[in-house]
Image: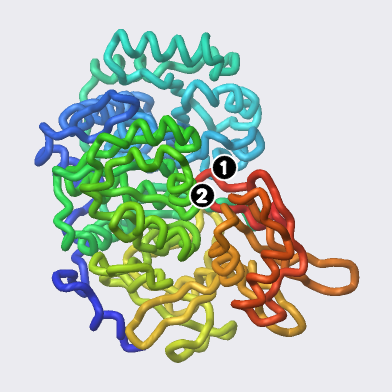
Amino acid sequence: MDKVWLKHYQKGVPYEINANTYASLVQLFEESCQKNKKNMAYINMGSSISYAELDQLSKTFATYLQQLGLKKGARVAVMMPNILQYPIAVFGILRAGFVVVNTNPLYTCDEVIHQLADAGAEVLVVMANFAKTVEKALPQLPSLKKIIITQLGDVFPFFKRIIVNAVVKYIKKMVPAYTIPEAVSFQQALQQGMKGCYKPITLNHEDIAFLQYTGGTTGISKGAILTHGNMVANVLQAYAWIEPLGINSHDIIVTALPLYHIFSLTANCLTFLKAGAQNILITNPRDMPRFINDIKNTGFTAITGVNTLFNALLNHPKCSEIDFSKLKLALSGGMALQKSVAMKWQELTHSRVLEAYGLTETSPAVTINPMSLETYNGSIGLPLPSTDISIRDDEGKELSLDKKGELCVKGPQVTPGYWGRPEETAEVFWSDGFLRTGDVARVDEQGYVYLVDRKKDMILISGFNVYPNEVEQVISMLPGVLEVGVVGVNVDDKGEQVKACIVKRDPTLTAEQVIDHTREHLTAYKIPKIIEFYDELPKTNVGKILRRALA
């Protein structure tokens, strides 16, 4: 493809980045804390910590971890939502020379056992609300040596801490009773760390920073190895891309997606850290009234989300109360951005929402639309600096422009493989080092990438390929539709059929109206044969519709 996309880079964006600018994420972190020590780094529920406080608290936590006698590269799991303790713990783990194992706090006991055992985690930092699950899992986690439990308000000012923790535990009863006698509190860990002396650890690009587990929606969850080199590269790639917007220490980003998810981790926690900007941490974005109240008067300049989050925000009656006047960047990833959502966002906010694409194995960003894009274009953008892509058939042969095939990626942000799984690692790489993403895409003559769908989600109708994204885009344009998910289902001996699962915006919407609408925009074999209406659709922890559950 001769990197045709380079000709269409926005002015000021380099073709390549120098990943050697930083030896590790720790170096990047410490530089940012020093430069921006007087600035606010994170705010949550009205309380904030500065870069200077983040620097000191994470160093104190690192000192405590080093006192446990763990070897360099030991895995430390973090199991909490977006609260102030998350960045303190994560940067503390990295500064101590250990590996962060991000763990979804909503995991079941079996899922916790699988992930922590697979990673060989020796320490776990968990929010008290989820400690009961950990208690159940403990008998099957012999490698776990230390458990650190934190409560929601542990980093808040003293009186607020006491009140918030009491309300959460005794009034809202959000902390199920648990018994883990050997556990220490986050506050105890910090107090003990203050008594010790932090020992800086030499880290380089080959050292592992994160074991980032894939969602496990298609089988057993695997830990993608993300090195300090991978993460530094992706931060520098993303930062170079958004630099034309003038992102700096005065910016404020809304972080509603969980930081334990790779999209939010790199885009919000790390890239905006490099800028010295402020993160507004939203602990529970499903509480939409509270979410809106937390951001409406902040003058935020950036926000990231998935299509369903933007859609839910736009359809809430209080959305009009939000001040969007300073918004520079709205970035969508994780799932396909629907045209109806993009256009409604632009109409309301007078700014565009840009679609990006990535995956856990690429730290995650691969492509982003230019910051200068004026309106929705249906593309997932252009490959980032120092990133090469290739569209290939099932035999690995590269296809020409505008041909549909598997999107393959090569670059400094690409994982070296899966933790302890050499066979699976070999399966996802071609012999020339390109990673197979499992996504079907095409590239136009300007180098813009258009995501068609996941290969595994493709529906086969009488020998023709039907891509759920395309059908979802059409149905979502109906004014009476709030959300839609499309899957293929086998019905008796008729083979696969297209099924559309819909949440109504208009209660009078009928299946006949949906089918009539699709007839205007889709060829006959793509039209859903089954229409089902639901009060809500099953979603992942970041709001991605679970097609597997719909089937």
Location of the N terminus by quadrant is bottom left
For disc 2, the marked residue is 213
For the point 38% across and 72% down, the residue is: 377
The alpha-carbon separation of the residues under discs 2 and 1 comes to 8 Å
Q: Amino acid at mark 1?
A: Gln
For the point 65% across and 25% down, the residue is: 136
Q: Earlier in the sequence, mark 2 or mark 1?
A: 1
For the point 30% across and 16% down, the residue is: 192
Image quarter of residue 43: top left
Left or right of 486: which side holds 194?
Answer: left
Pointers 2 and 1 in contact (C-beta within 8 Å): yes
Image quarter of residue 471: bottom right
Q: Position of residue 159 (x, y in %)?
A: 31, 8
Considering only vertical position in the picture, is 525 above or below 108? below
SS of the residue at dot 2?
strand
Considering only vertical position in the picture, is 254 above or below 509? above
Left or right of 113: which side holds 375?
Answer: left
For disc 1, the marked residue is 115
Left or right of 335: which side holds 500?
Answer: right
Image quarter of residue 281: top left
For the point 24% across and 20% down, the residue is: 196
Q: Amino acid at mark 2?
A: Tyr
Q: Position of residue 393 (x, y in %)?
A: 55, 84
